[in-house]
Amino acid sequence: MLEITPLHYSVLSAALFMIGVIGVLVRRNIIIIFMSIELILNAVNINLVALSDQLQNLIGQVFVVFVIAVAAAEAAVGLGIIIAFYRNKETVNIDEMSLMRW
Amino acid sequence: MEAFVFYLLATLILGLGIMVITARSAVHSVLFLVLNFLLVAILYVTLSAQFVAVIQVLVYAGGIVVLYLFVVMLVSLKKAPELRSDSRRVARTGLLLAGAVLAELIAIVWYTSANGSAPPAQAASDFPPRLAGDAMLNTERLGWVLYTEYLIPFEVASMLLLVAMIGAIVLAKKNL
Amino acid sequence: MLDTFVIPLLQIAVLVNALLVTVTFLVLMERKVMGWAQARLGPMRVGPYGILQAIVDPIKLILKEDITPANADRFVFTLAPIMSLVPALVVFSVIPFGPEQPYYIADINVGLLFIISVTSIGVYGIILGGWSSNSKYPLLASLRASAQLISYEIAVVMTLVSVVLTAGTLNMIGIVEAQREAGLWFAFVQPVACVLVFIGGLAETNRLPFDLPEAETELTGGFHTEYSGMRFSLFFLAEYANIIVISAIVALMFFGGWMRPFPNVEALAFLDLIPGWVWFCGKIFFFLYLFVWIRATFPRYRYDQLMAIGWKVLIPIAIGNLVLTGIAKVVL
Amino acid sequence: MDFIWLIPLIPGIGAALNGLVGVRSFSKRTAGLVATGAMAAAFLLSVVAFVQLLGSAERYHKVTVASWIPPIPLETANGIGSFEVPWAFTLDPLSGMMLLVVTGIGLLIHIYSIGYIDHEPRGGVARFFCYLNLFCFFMLILVLGSSFLVMFVGWEGVGLCSYLLIGYWYKKKSASDAGKKAFIVNRIGDWGFILGIFLVFFTFGTLDFREVAVAAAALPVETAAVGFGVISLICLLLFIGATGKSAQIPLYVWLPDAMEGPTPVSALIHAATMVTAGVYMVCRNAVLFTHAPMVMEVVAAIGVVTALMAATIGLVQTDIKRVLAYSTVSQLGYMFLATGVGAFAAAAFHLMTHAFFKALLFLGSGSVIHAMNEEQDMRRMGGLRRHMPLTFATMCIGAVAIAGIPPLSGFFSKDEILYRTFLHSPLLWGLGAVTAAMTAFYMFRLIYMTFFGEYRGPAPDAEGHGDGHGHAWHGPHESPRLMTWPLVALAVGAVFAGFVGVPAALGGSNMIEHFLEPSFTVPGAAHAAEAAHHYEVEWALMAFSVLLAAGGILFAYRNYVQRPEAADELATRLAGTHRLLTNKYYVDELYDATVVSGSMSSARGLWRFDGGVVDGAVNGTGWATRASAMISHVLDKYVVDGLVNLVGWICREGSYGFRRAQTGLIQNYAFATLVGVFAFVTWFLVGR
């Protein structure tokens, strides 16, 4: 228990991941859902960095850099869409974003 | 000491994560998210990934979350989204299912750990950019790998960011 | 245990206290210099030449009633000043006053990146402070401030990257040592970067001529309009701490830090009699004086002019400088 | 003489100017001046060329302007020959004479036309002069062309212009019909001509007149004893072409109808120049024809019969222009008679004199018609000599000339022909002499009915009711000077043209015959021995024909001046003959009944065949296609579409169930993903 192995980081990562998933499933404010997605990405990053340290291999950190870049892009475009949607619908409730349904 | 730091950080990270998804106010969510990210950055430091830690703070905390904060403040809500609900929601089931998956994952980890098949401390990786004990070289090595081995993905990522920037401007601006 | 906990804590205590005292006297200096610049005397009542004003002001702020507006978000309202001050103080952990151990707290290999990332956290204090006041003017001011900070941060970081290219390291001590090896302050190697960083610093600390977030005539005081007492003074401290940070960064990166002028010229070796941290503090003091001087001299920009300067002048120049530096690095 | 190619070109340019620019933007006077100027230039050049020809020793000049058809290897009777036709023009005595006739008379008629065509609208005038110049262009090509094919270009070109000018008043049905008739009838002749050209090339390997003549001269003369050989066939085919163009039996029917065209056109094309092209062509191929004596007999026979028949019809016609038209046909018959008996020079001589006096007569009649406000019926004229003395005088000269009264031109040329015919065959001579008497009669009948007696025409209208030209007609009047001066010039020609051919019997030297001789022989050929001159016979024949002419004139005078009713009595007494003649021997009706209706009925038959069998086959195919299409339609609709619809139906019915899954709630989708993750992780866990 006192020795911290990558498995501990994996459990932490899984737990944070599931917190993010629950946020996505439960919350109705789309901005918070986006933040939950950021949590999920962070969970993945933790895993990558932990294993990078364990394996003494830099590729994990390289992937973290790419994940952050993608997260930045996702946040920019996603929030742009939210702003545009809010401008038209005056809402950020995800339940009301069902225009494409049959 | 190491275990103490890890458990402290893990507890804080998970706790802040839960607060992010349970906070009533979106602004509070953002605040907790920032703190969560800062703590994750500290976790990275303990894993001797200083560059990634700094990037985490600079990009996530200093950039992306500021963006969220802006949007939260711009989208001034007349009625909270949580007040209206769709009957087809699956929130409760989702909660249970997520818990089940988490339990399974932990079970897998536990099982793996119990069978002693944990990955070796020194993996037989011959890939050149191995982390040396000297932390001074972390940033340089990362830079080296990014600009040689991963040059094309790196450039693609930069193009992705450019496209995302233009897309965000087009989406958010009222009249171009 | 001694090396990991006691000495660093002592260093932190000394540094934070010194910083806070410096800020109080900095305020006094600003008032006096402004007064002289405007043909006034400035504060004269408390102590000789008003010197004790620096002690009286903090006392007044501590003793004042701390008011929280009725509809404010109490938690955020309290958190905001803290989030503003903490990054400003944390930055000092990687600023070296000299090359050896007692003169710095931490020597990390991504020192400059650390400074940049931590200062970028400072914007939360401003945004949240303005938002949580639940008041119109502070909200506008905080939006202005954060937009300004983010805009100018890009220019400053871009410029600093060119300095990093020149030095070949992100380590703060390494950058100073690089100047010793070059035999020249980077102010002479990267004059454009030097000016750019200083201007960007003015904007990032919301100083004149870029003090629009605190423009009294438009916003009745800025994002901290609703703050009073100690919470206000935390914002106040954070702002002046940031000024000192900027001065320190400019001194370190462009003016040789703790080194005497022209460190390679043997004829000036007698200047080494003065200790390095004194040189460094003197340089910081010079830039602090420059901040005040500029405040007394320049008029304020309009907001659109401010953003135009940031995006259309500083950032293109920074990128151009970066490209030129890269080319020079490859060619030389 | 290298410039002779310019002579056709100048009228061509005039035609192009008038046709491309003039119709839209030239005034009447400008259009006339352009055309007349072009003709004047051509005439001047012709005179210069002719004078040079007279001065040169060798009376044959060939000018090659440009290549036309490059050498093509073609099968001939003597192996592979090279079919090559350059744009080459020949100036020799025959073409030189024709050159002067065409350009000279053409110039006069152009001048005349300026006055005559003045009533037409502006664009019409330019169009008229364009056609007229174009005609001269083609006619000169025809005359100057040094090979069959170049001549054929001109030949077809003048046919085209003839069609255009006959149908000049194209809004008038009879005019456009006449144009078509002329064109179609000419096609039949052209068919013969072009077959002849093919045969010429196949036989001799060349189309150049001179080379053909030289080659033909080397071949034996195809007398009856030798048999009907290839040269005879060539000549027969060429003569068919000539009958078409020169209005001989059986293809003469178009010429009288061609009088629907404007009178200057009748004068230029249908009297003086184009219709003589057949004669010219036969003369041009004199060597060929002399090698085919049997065809010569045919030519002579056709010629004299045509002459006689046309003259008889001319006796009773009442339309002033039709009288002249039949007269023309008759005179052309004379010319063919002359060529048939071998008197090519006499034919050419008569051609020239005829050109003068017939053009004069036509222009005179045009003047009369003009004066009578477009009235052509002689029965409604009379007494015009008081109103238009100059026209009367010149037309009298023309009539006297054509009647063969010495010393006018007609006498010399006609008697030359008659003398030579007499030497060849007294029977033909007899027919020719009768024709001459009839000619004298009907010409003076024309003169008397038109210019003598009482005025029988319509009264002048004071108000000037719509006569189509927008001005009142004030009764018969003398024509303007532009029209009368050409008459005078032609009259001078009609009087004096004959003196170039005064026969030896009358103390002359028959200059024209000697002049033209080189054109009818091949170089180096021995001069035919001068035929023994029977001056006594010739004198007798002259006297006889003059007597006949005088008799004809007197008979006309008796019937139309002294006792105008006598003519009608005569007509009543010989009612059958008169009806036959009035109806022109029913030739048109005969043609209608045989050729026209034959081709019509065969066309109808073909049409029925087309409608019944060909269309039936097409429609049958279409019906079959439709039927099969219907079958495949049914198949398509119920089988193929059914399958497609079945697929669609299955999709639709199936999706009723599945679309409930599409709630539009993103979280539901995320939940589905999570279920998948759960399943996967469970499988992983249990699978271990």
Image: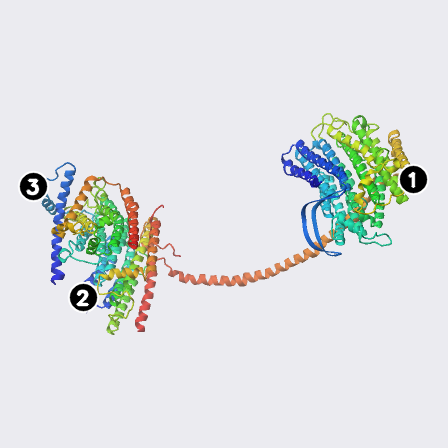
Residue B65 numbered mark, or none: none
Closest to the camera, between mark 3 and mark 1, is: 1
Inspect the image, locate mark 1, and give the three-letter code of the amino acid beneath it.
Val
Q: CA distance from mark 3 to mark 1?
A: 172 Å
For mark 2, give the secondary structure.
helix
Subunit bearing disc 1: D
D484 relative to C79 in the view: left or right: right
Residue D588 appears in which quarter of the rendering? Answer: top right
Q: Quadrant of the N terminus of chain D?
A: top right
For mark 3, give the secondary structure.
helix
The reply to whether discs 2 and 3 touch (Cβ–Cβ < 8 Å) is no
Asked if one can make out residue D442 in the rendered structure from this viewpoint, the answer is no
Q: Position of residue D207 (x, y in %)?
A: 74, 50
Q: Dot 2 surroundings within 10 Å: few (below 14), some, or many (20 or more)?
A: few
D272 relative to B127 in the view: left or right: right
The reply to whether discs 1 and 2 touch (Cβ–Cβ < 8 Å) is no
Q: CA distance from mark 1 to mark 2?
A: 161 Å
Judge if badges 1 and 2 mark residues of a common chain: no
Q: Dot 3 surroundings within 10 Å: few (below 14), some, or many (20 or more)?
A: few
Subunit bearing disc 2: B
Q: Position of residue D227 (x, y in %)?
A: 85, 54
Q: CA distance from mark 2 to mark 3?
A: 56 Å
Instruction: Identify the residue position indicated by label 3 in the image.
Output: C48
Instruction: Identify the residue position indicated by label 1 in the image.
Output: D537
A42 or C31, which lies in front? C31
Instruction: Identify the residue position indicated by label 2 in the image.
Output: B3
D74 or D460, which lies in front? D74
